[in-house]
Image (cartoon, rainbow, N blue to C red):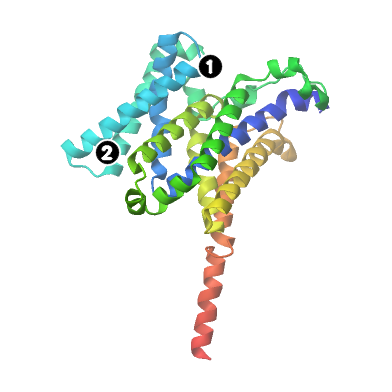
Amino acid sequence: MSAADFLIIDLPAMLVAVLAAASCGLLGNFLVLRKQALIGDAISHVALPGIVVGFLVAGSIATFPLMLGAMGAAILAAVLIETIRRVGGLESGAAMGVVFTTMFAGGIVLLEQTGASNAHIDAEHALYGNLESTLWLGLERWGDFLTWQALSDMPRSLATLGATTLGIGTLIILFYKELKVTTFDPGLGISLGLPVKSISTALIVLVAIAAVAAFEAVGSILVIAMFICPAATARMMTDNLTAQLWLSVLAAALAGIGGYVFAAFGPQLWGSADSLSAAGMIAVIAGALQCAAMAAAPKHGALSRFRRTRAQKLDLTA
């Protein structure tokens, strides 16, 4: 493979994967700590009908109308979940499951029955995205990144995810203390006069924005995995929130790069000319990192707990 092929085909896809994983993973830390991890799952499903409606209204796949449609769908889903919970007497998890599976199925029906399936948001792409077709044309060598022509030819999904990740990171830095207090002790936040409900709502809005920004490129499977796996992996490794945020970004980057490389070039190791689904393999690598952390994390890993338990038993018998 030449340098130009790598820059045009592989590098932009890896960058999109890393940015999608990082933006979702950063927010996933707060969802995991708040015990709301399924919200990322729900929003990634309910976003689909909103994206389709946004496309039908706007007539294009521009980011802004799709994002508005997805956020409208997220608000509708929240209202439906609360209505089902109160009227039907179901617990929140069951009501959430009913709403997001029904809305996702409705989005698939809309895709099949309207012209949206001809705009690169068909059912196949809704599940595992279109990462392999992310091309950055016009690049021949590394120095081309510094030219205006190359920047103007940047893939739309890469620009969108870059802006989304930068925005999410900036907001987390600016409101780090507020997020930390309302995540670990909402009661303390209320006593300090913090708008706890508004902060929780803003977090959900950011989750919806991150899900929509990543949805087109990587699909719902990877969005769901990235909201949970990097954060859960980092949580196993440390009890410090700042360190957890950095570790989640590292886990997201390892999953994005490693998953893409293995999907694109791994089959060649056993003589196959075909490649694997990049989004699917990235999710698999993210899950493997989570399993490794569960087994070997220095404090919370299974092996560490086993050694501590064994040491305690030996002390008691000594």
Residue nearest the observer in this picture, 281 or 64: 64
Task: Tell me, yes or no, if residue 121 can be seen here.
Answer: no
Q: Which mark is residue 31?
A: none
Residue, disc 1: 120
Counting from the top left corner in percent of width and height, residue 108 is at 40, 22
**In the figure, 129 relative to 94: above or below?**
above
Q: Residues within 10 Å of mark 1 (few under 14, many from 20)?
A: some
- Residue sitting at 53 percent across and 78 percent down? 310
Counting from the top left corner in percent of width and height, residue 115 is at 44, 9
Helix, strand or loop at disc 2?
Answer: helix
Q: Residues within 10 Å of mark 2 (few under 14, many from 20)?
A: many
Helix, strand or loop at disc 1?
Answer: loop
Q: Amino acid at mark 1?
A: His
Counting from the top left corner in percent of width and height, residue 247 is at 60, 50
- Residue sitting at 44 percent across and 10 percent down? 58
Quadrant in which the N terminus appears:
top right
- Residue sitting at 48 percent across and 27 percent down? 212
Residue, disc 2: 95
| Outermost residue to the front | 193
Rendered image quadrant of residue 13: top right
Q: Amino acid at mark 2?
A: Ala
Counting from the top left corner in percent of width and height, residue 296 is at 59, 61
Rendered image quadrant of residue 169: top right
